[in-house]
Image (spheres, helix red, strand yellow):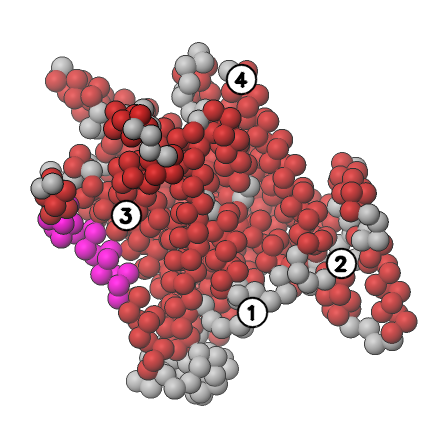
Amino acid sequence: MTAVPTVRREALHFALRNRKLVVGTVIVAVFLVAGLAGPLLFDHGPNDYVGPPMASPSGEFWFGTTTFGQDVFAQFVYGLRSTFLVGVLGGVLAAVVGMVVGFVAGYRGGWVDELLTMLTNIVLVLPALVVLLIINAYLGVRSIGVQALFIGLTSWPWAARAIRAQTFSLRSREFVDLARLSGVRTPKIILREIAPNMSSYLFLTFILLFGSAILIAASLDFIGLGPTEGVSLGLMLNNAARWSALQLGLWWWFIPPGAGITAIVGALYVMNVGLDEVFNPKLREM
Amino acid sequence: MRRYFGRKLLIYGLTFFVAVTINWMIPRFMPGDPVQSMLSRANVAQPAAVEAMRAHYTAMFGFDLPLWQQYLNFWGSLLKGDLGISIWLFPTPVSDVIIRAVPYTLGLLIPSILLSWFAGNRFGAFAARRKWLDNSVLPVGYVLTATPYMWLAILLAWALGILAGVFPVAGAYGFDMQPSLSWDFLGSLAQHWFLPFASLFLVAFGGWAIGMRNMIIYELEADYVNYLRALGAPMRLVRRYAFRNAILPQVTGLALQLGVLVAGALVTEIVFSYPGLGHLILQAIQNQDFFLLQGTFLFIVIGVLIANFIIDIAYVLVDPRTRTGMGGAA
């Protein structure tokens, strides 16, 4: 029984010394805290007209104001909230669908596998954003939850494929055979014997899905199919472009939202590589 | 090999079928009434006129027929190349509007995809396991690949277009020009093309470079590499072998990334008001032009399927295992 804690301690040892992982986690954490706590600083909503129009950043309005006198900093911290929400909901849903499809296809094999692989390949070839455009264009009222739902339902295929391949290589191992011989039922074998052996891999998959959900949501928002109410980083970019912030030179309007998305997604990717190095000794820097 | 292509074509055929079915289903089963929203956009006051328009649009969509017949009719008109009439550019047929826009999108997409793929792979392979490059340039790669396409486009338009005034930031050619085969026109075309191309190229480049760098690092741990090095092979040769192995997943990756790249081109076009498919989509959404939106969707799906098939052929060319039926990527 001492083996598990030692492995964990070793992973922790390398995790704390992995610069990529630490830097990535810190950046994501900073934005998360800003998104959670930031909105509490304001007694006005993100879309309220609180200041003079087109004011440049100052002590009162940290990121300046829009052409309508909205506080860009307030929009930014509220937008962070929606960005994280879409990322988590969309990422979790995509990971769950991908895991179910991947595990079942890889473990059962046979015609179940054929069928699920076919389904995976079809959804994989369909360009996700364009499908989302069509769906969202017909939705009269759009919310972050529905947006995340459809993002999750369209972005799982590559995860399912990767998980299927991993499951395939695990299912003929001795410990899985042993579990099957002792009469353990399939769902339990998948949950108890197969999933734990690729838990690090599953976590990495989730991080990537999280990042891509944020990017897809930002594109949708930018095209004008974002949530009909509220604010998000993509919507801020959309508004800035629509009300010609570029031509008017209001750089404080379009730089923060894009920088926020880039920083969060980039930090997630870097975290992913760092974690990969922690879990896979071959990749550690020598 | 025949089995390989047979399987692929089956998938693409089914995908096309699913895409058409989605296209047919969404206006019919989504909450909300497309006819109603087109009517409210038309902003007509007399009730009699509204009723006439409602009847017209309902007949145009064929909403008054039984569902199975609507579905068959949909396929029928699709196979005749009839995608309906655009509302935004009434009365131009949707297929004409799209065909006019396609060259601009392809002109952006094809060079940026191919160049970023080649340059990114070369660069990533070069940077792998070279201390200073790995540590200084790869963070840049991560930032680039995490950048939303439209944001990089906005930044480039602002910095090089508006502040420096070097490049124009809207349209595909000067507003004072007519398309013609003169040097003036081609020059203006190239000038307008450069910034959207550059922003697509840069984001994709970062992704390929990182992917290749990671693949090479995996490969350099493989047994054949250890064997070659034990034999005393020069590092250049080892790297070349690693590159040939690492390029295979990158070819598959290109197929997987197509959707993302197309999406990137769409939003980039919107930033630069570049008259390609992205611009059409924006207009279709703003004008509630559902025929145009759906036509564009089908066109993009067909384009992505064709591109996938080309990549499959390329894969057979670079991976000898698929030719001898020994597997490889199924």
**Dot 2, how many residues are within 10 Å of its Cα: few (below 14), some (14-19), or many (20+)?**
some
Q: Are marks 1 and 4 in contact (CB under 8 Å)?
A: no
Q: To which chain does the residue with label 2 belong?
A: B
Q: Are marks 4 and 3 in contact (CB under 8 Å)?
A: no
> Which element type, helix, strand or loop, lies under badge 4?
helix
Q: Same chain, marks 2 and 4?
A: yes
Identify which residue is drawn at 12% across, 45% down: A5
In this picture, residue A240 sits left or right of residue A159: right
Q: Quadrant of residue B125?
A: top left
Give the residue at mark 1.
A228
**Residue type, mark 1 in image:** Thr
Give the residue at mark 4.
B3
Residue A20 included in the magenta stretch of the image: yes
Identify which residue is drawn at 19% across, 46% down: B135
Q: Nearer the viewer, residue B229 or B177?
A: B229
Q: To which chain does the residue with label 3 belong?
A: A
> Which element type, helix, strand or loop, lies under badge 1?
loop
In primary-sequence order, the first of circles 2 and 4 is 4
Give the residue at mark 3.
A272
Residue B127 included in the magenta stretch of the image: no
Identify which residue is drawn at 50% across, 49% down: A153
**Distance between the alpha carbons at the discs numbered 2 and 4:** 45 Å
The answer to whether residue A203 is visible is yes
Q: To which chain does the residue with label 1 belong?
A: A
In this picture, residue B327 sits left or right of residue B27: left
> Which element type, helix, strand or loop, lies under badge 3?
helix
